[in-house]
Amino acid sequence: MSIKISIRNSLNTKTVKNHVFFTNKDFRISEISKLPLSKYSSFINKSLSSSELGNKNFISLDINASQKVILIKIKDNQSPLDIEKIGAEFYVYLRSNLFLKTNFYEQNIRSTFPKNKFFFDQFAQGLQLKSYEFNKYKSKSKEKIYDIEVLNKNKSFQFNKNKKYKSLIEGTNLTKDLVSEPGNILHPDEYANRLLKLRKFGLKVNVYDKKKLKKLGMNALLGVGQGSIRGSYLVILEWKGSKVKKKPLAFVGKGVCFDTGGISLKPAKFMEDMTYDMAGSAVVVGLMKSLALRKAKINAIGVVGLVENMPGGNAQRPGDIVKSYSGKTIEVLNTDAEGRLVLADALTYTEKKYKPEFIIDLATLTGAIIVSLGSEFAGLFSNNDKLSKQLFDAGQKVGERVWRMPLDKNYDKLINSKNADMQNINYVGGAGSTTAAQFLQRFILNKTPWAHLDIAGMAFSKYGGALNSEGATGFGVRLLNQLIEDYYE
């Protein structure tokens, strides 16, 4: 993290280079003169025109040769998401101008936004989300620290008192860290070991290895990983935050730590991107850590299937038939349609063992969803209208948007097999994301409300977005947390 935020009760303003003030007014000389800047009135250059200030969110004005005043414009009644986005923009502004040390003032924050006691938490969350960088393996990298201090003169300023904001940063950054790790480091064995360490946050963690999975009959999941020298695992993370006996909320993630395609080998170009084919599992892990950190008053289950899809002498072949945990048989026509095999066993197991309120699975499942929705929306497929609307509304609030796509029994004929109960791909072509979701739906056996989020276009960004830098985005942690806050907590 390249942002450091601290609170101080005293400050030598003579040593401060960059004084930052919020305003809810337009950048006009007449309005700037009304700000509590009496100490710095000399900086207002009377020759500075309104046109020079322009229609911007930030301006910096010289007090003297060594000091500046930076103004941030945020209008009244902005939503938390709008405030977060301006915080993210401000990080870019700091970085572009190399403002390494800045100072905010508690009195200015409170007087500008008296009705929003969490304003600075929201602004800081945008800063922190946008500032994420993965520099772990850069041997000569010296990370620039952008040091932000808030002068708390009246000792009444509160920051990070609401556990929500800090827990969301930590959960989202864990997701980003996991997605950013290379496949030779974060293989299934290492991933499972890291998840065991989450016990220190109050999560119960159980790891099922190959031997246990074989005994359970999870042959669909095991078939994907059988070409790798690494293990295959199902890891269960449990959070019990409610004393009332309620059905748990269940979240299931695809954790293909590296996907070569197996015997149905992918093209070499861009195969390196397949290190993030475990992003669905990383979202579940980040969410569970966040829930534990903020002591969420719900019961939740996180289930992740961890495998590596490799070619090899023992690899699964096209044409193989496997019997899933559900008892249904699957003809594997393409070993690169592996994520749905991992999820098939994980979904049925989660439903049967935990009988949850709902199940939401997340997976970088199909390239077809990127053709449909690009990198603006995740694909949402569901058997339940209520859950779908809740996910859509939660996504709008936090800027992690989903768009509902169709499921219909007429698609079943595209994945029916002559030799087994079903086949893992649609050979006819078309509706790739829908037929994948239609496949998954067959493993929800007891009509549990279920939603599938295809996040293939959202988990990783080569260009960055409003609240994330380029690379792993952490998409899904904030979305699912908002869903829980709004409807289930």
Image (tube, helix red, strand yellow):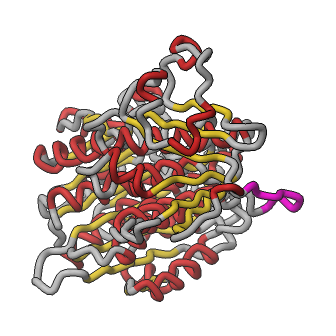
Is 276 in the magenta?
no
Which quarter of the rendering shows the C terminus? bottom left
On screen, residue 102 versus residue 210, left or right, reads right
On screen, residue 47 versus residue 390, left or right, reads right
Residue 378 higher or lower than 57, as above or below: below
Which quarter of the rendering shows the N terminus? bottom right
Residue 233 higher or lower than 399, as above or below: below
The answer to which image quadrant residue 216 occupies is bottom left
Q: Is residue 284 visible?
A: no
| Residue sitting at x 37%, y 29% | 25
Residue 353, percent from left and from top: 23, 78
Of residue 478 and residue 6, the one placed in the foreground of this image is 6
Of residue 480 and residue 485, the one placed in the foreground of this image is 485
Residue 204, percent from left and from top: 38, 86
The answer to which image quadrant residue 121 occupies is bottom left
Find the magenta span and give its range: 137-144
| Residue sitting at x 51%, y 14% | 50
Q: Is residue 29 visible?
A: yes
Residue 249, percent from left and from top: 22, 68
| Residue sitting at x 55%, y 40% | 90
Residue 91, percent from left and from top: 59, 44
Is 139 in the magenta?
yes
| Residue sitting at x 46%, y 21% | 28
Of residue 135 and residue 438, the one placed in the foreground of this image is 135
The answer to which image quadrant residue 348 occupies is bottom left
| The residue positioned farthest toward the right in the image shown | 140
On screen, residue 156 versus residue 16, left or right, reads left
**Dominant SS in magenta:** loop
Of residue 79 and residue 338, the one placed in the foreground of this image is 79
